Image: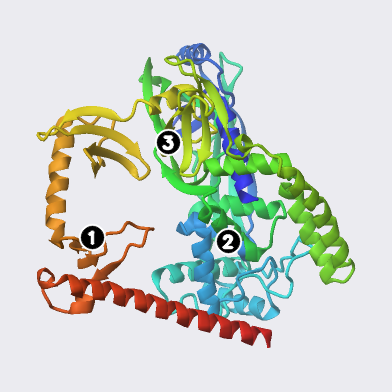
């Protein structure tokens, strides 16, 4: 289910059409020359409107027309439940959902915190009293306010408390590693803050009239008068923005103005934390399943977590400095993403397939309703047989119908257009080794040509022009001194140089840009590395002794996945020089590894059978 949310959000982002507008900020001065910042109450749709406003400001006079001051407060948040702990640890500590739950599990095992899989907000009376003692002794009576939070969800696990330290007299625990200490501190502060007074603030809003315009400036200020719970938790979030003392009718002067072109944005991509928040609000799953859901969709390569660089974008800016208007084109980086969740091509295909064939199963309400049914079964107010029957019978029918689904649908085939050179159809689909582009059809007289999509490309968004670029590879660069053709290309494991039947990886330059000179340098380095890597080869045998990352090792000559065996020389032969090893010794070492693996597998199987027998008892 979570990968459907990620796919739908990505499609929203792709479909978003960015619109520009001009936002205006200004620096004003009062009669004593104290400076403060204001913003215009409206945005301008065009550059011309922004220019006209700036021109008018050169002759405008300004005065204060209203000053509104009123007290405000901020209340502490409830103590942590599973989902809020995952979200806060992500935002404040940069922890992944899986990492947070793993650390919390260890803290629970050590007796440092209460059970970490809960959606109950309640604290025991013992914890509330302990929090009171700590707060009053550390900060004073004014900072304490007992609070008893009620859980909104009817299915909340009230048998558990909220997540809190087991001993509130311990703000820290000796012996914890750095990450565990940070998470414990977060839980401690949140628990303590939940039993503290509100933070008191003084909010000020000033409206400023512009003599020759219908728009007006607004100045907002916020002053913290009593810190309350902010003394313990999230104090830096209360930013004091001081304003000068102004009265209605006071005249103001313009010091500077910036009218900046800005662009509308689509909804943000999900982070692990925001995805947890979304599925919790939708009633999907239980606290114990949130981390598993987020981890599983990544483990199965439906969703990837990536940090991506943005692209440069120009924007227009109009300024007034020292009474002079100037216009300029500035640039900014847009689209940069840090640790955001992106759908893979598999996710797009799977979501479409499930929505077309199993819409009720992948429906957002399905899991929520099923959770409700499980609660009723547990309360013995609903028979389990009816719940299972209502699910299985229509599901079985859908399975039978899905057998007729075409191969093109299951592989997410999408036609992009025609190849201008051959006139053949260009399409993209998902294959055994990932997404690829294809020119032509399987039943054409001439075989179709194929090219793998590159990192960051997917079958959902790739265009015809981008797909045709893929077929410009491999790119022939020239020849080596030995007459071997040198080519640059993209492969399954990244860009590379090919010379004859050998390959060298490309790292700092793309296949489109690499020169023959650079390629030859890489080839020389690769040949030197290979020569130094080989310690000894044996006639009439594939076995070799090679230099590896962890020292010399014996290799049986087979590739990974096809019976490859590596044996570290030092582990078997101690200080014996690798060059002195005989073929027979190498064969025996490889056979010994096979026997050790077989023995380990047998031992594991015996242990598994014993465990199964114990569970049956």
Q: Give the percent coordinates (x, y) of residue 541.
A: 21, 62
- Element type at mark 2: helix
Pointer 1 or 3: first along the chain: 3
Label 3 packing within 10 angstroms: few (<14), some (14-19), many (20+): many
Marks 1 and 2, Cα distance to the nearest angstrom? 47 Å
Pointer 1 or 2: first along the chain: 2
Pointer 2 or 3: first along the chain: 2
Judge depth for marks 1 and 2 and give the one in front. 1
Judge depth for marks 2 and 3 and give the one in front. 3
- Side (left or right) of 29 relative to 296: left
Label 1 packing within 10 angstroms: few (<14), some (14-19), many (20+): few
- 402 to 17, vertically: above or below: below
- 116 to 558, vertically: above or below: below
Q: Dot 1 corresponds to which residue?
A: 542
Nearest to the observer: residue 507 or residue 353: 353
- Side (left or right) of 206 relative to 242: right
Marks 2 and 3, Cα distance to the nearest angstrom? 33 Å
What residue lies at 46% left-to-right and 59% top-to-bottom? Answer: 93
- 449 to 155, vertically: above or below: above
State the image quarter where residue 187 is shown: bottom right
- Element type at mark 3: strand
Residue 249 makes an appearance in the image: no
What residue lies at 37% left-to-right and 23% top-to-bottom? Answer: 330
- Element type at mark 1: loop
Query: Residue 458 has which mark?
Result: none
Q: Quadrant of the C terminus?
A: bottom right
Query: Residue 452 has which mark?
Result: 3
Judge depth for marks 1 and 3 and give the one in front. 1
What residue lies at 55% left-to-right and 43% top-to-bottom? Answer: 346
Q: How is the image coloured?
A: rainbow
Q: Dot 2 corresponds to which residue?
A: 291
State the image quarter where residue 558 is shown: bottom left
């Amino acid at each position: 289910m979570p990968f459907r949310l990620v796919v739908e959000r990505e499609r929203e982002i792709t479909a978003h059409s960015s619109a520009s507008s001009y936002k205006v900020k200004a620096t004003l001065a009062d009669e004593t020359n104290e400076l403060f910042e204001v913003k215009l109450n409206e945005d301008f749709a065009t550059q011309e409107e922004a220019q006209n406003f700036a021109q008018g400001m050169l002759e405008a006079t300004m005065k204060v027309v209203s000053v509104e001051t009123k007290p405000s407060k901020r209340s502490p948040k409830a103590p942590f439940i599973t989902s809020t702990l995952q979200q806060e640890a992500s935002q404040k500590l940069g922890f992944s959902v899986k990492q947070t739950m793993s650390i919390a599990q260890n803290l629970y095992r050590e007796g440092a915190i209460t059970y970490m899989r809960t959606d109950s907000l309640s604290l025991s009376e013992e914890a509330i009293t302990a929090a009171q003692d700590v707060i009053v002794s550390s900060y004073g009576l004014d900072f304490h306010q007992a609070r008893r939070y009620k859980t909104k969800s009817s299915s909340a696990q009230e048998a558990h408390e909220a997540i809190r330290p087991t001993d509130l007299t311990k703000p820290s625990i000796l012996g914890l590693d750095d990450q565990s200490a940070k998470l414990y501190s977060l839980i401690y502060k949140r628990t303590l803050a939940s039993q503290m007074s509100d933070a008191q603030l003084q909010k000020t809003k000033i409206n400023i009239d512009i003599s020759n315009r219908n728009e007006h400036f607004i100045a907002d200020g916020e002053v913290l008068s009593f810190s309350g719970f902010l003394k313990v938790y999230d104090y830096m979030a209360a930013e004091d923005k001081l304003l000068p003392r102004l009265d209605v009718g006071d005249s103001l002067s313009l010091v500077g103005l910036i009218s900046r072109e800005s662009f509308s944005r689509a909804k943000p991509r999900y982070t692990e934390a925001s995805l947890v928040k979304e599925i919790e609000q939708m009633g999907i799953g239980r606290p114990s399943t949130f981390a598993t859901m987020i981890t599983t969709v990544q483990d199965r390569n439906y969703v990837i977590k990536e940090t991506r660089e943005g692209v440069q974008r120009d924007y227009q800016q109009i300024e007034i400095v020292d009474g002079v208007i100037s216009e300029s084109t500035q640039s900014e980086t847009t689209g940069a993403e840090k640790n955001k969740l992106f759908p893979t091509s598999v996710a797009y295909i799977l979501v479409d397939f499930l929505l077309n064939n199993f819409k009720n199963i992948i429906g957002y309400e399905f899991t929520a309703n099923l959770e409700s049914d499980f609660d009723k079964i547990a309360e013995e107010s609903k028979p389990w047989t009816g719940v299972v029957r209502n699910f299985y019978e229509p599901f079985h029918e859908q399975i039978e119908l899905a057998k007729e689904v075409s191969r093109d649908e299951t592989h997410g085939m999408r036609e992009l257009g025609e190849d201008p050179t051959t006139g053949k159809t260009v399409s993209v689909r998902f294959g055994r080794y990932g997404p690829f582009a294809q020119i032509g059809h399987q039943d054409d007289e001439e075989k179709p040509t194929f090219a793998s999509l590159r990192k960051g490309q997917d079958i959902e968004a790739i265009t015809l022009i981008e797909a045709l670029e893929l077929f410009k590879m491999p790119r022939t660069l020239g020849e080596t001194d030995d007459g071997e053709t040198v080519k640059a290309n993209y492969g399954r494991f990244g860009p590379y140089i090919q010379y004859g039947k050998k390959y060298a990886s490309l790292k700092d330059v793309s296949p489109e840009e690499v020169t023959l000179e650079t390629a030859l340098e890489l080839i020389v380095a690769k040949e030197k590395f290979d020569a130094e890597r080989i310690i000894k080869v044996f006639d009439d045998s594939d076995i070799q002794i090679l230099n590896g990352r962890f020292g010399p090792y014996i290799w049986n000559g087979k590739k990974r996945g096809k019976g490859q065996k590596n044996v570290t020389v030092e582990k078997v032969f101690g200080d014996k020089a690798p060059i002195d090893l005989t073929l027979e010794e190498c064969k025996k070492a490889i056979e010994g590894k096979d026997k050790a693996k077989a023995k380990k597998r047998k031992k594991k199987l015996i242990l598994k059978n014993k465990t199964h027998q114990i569970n049956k008892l």
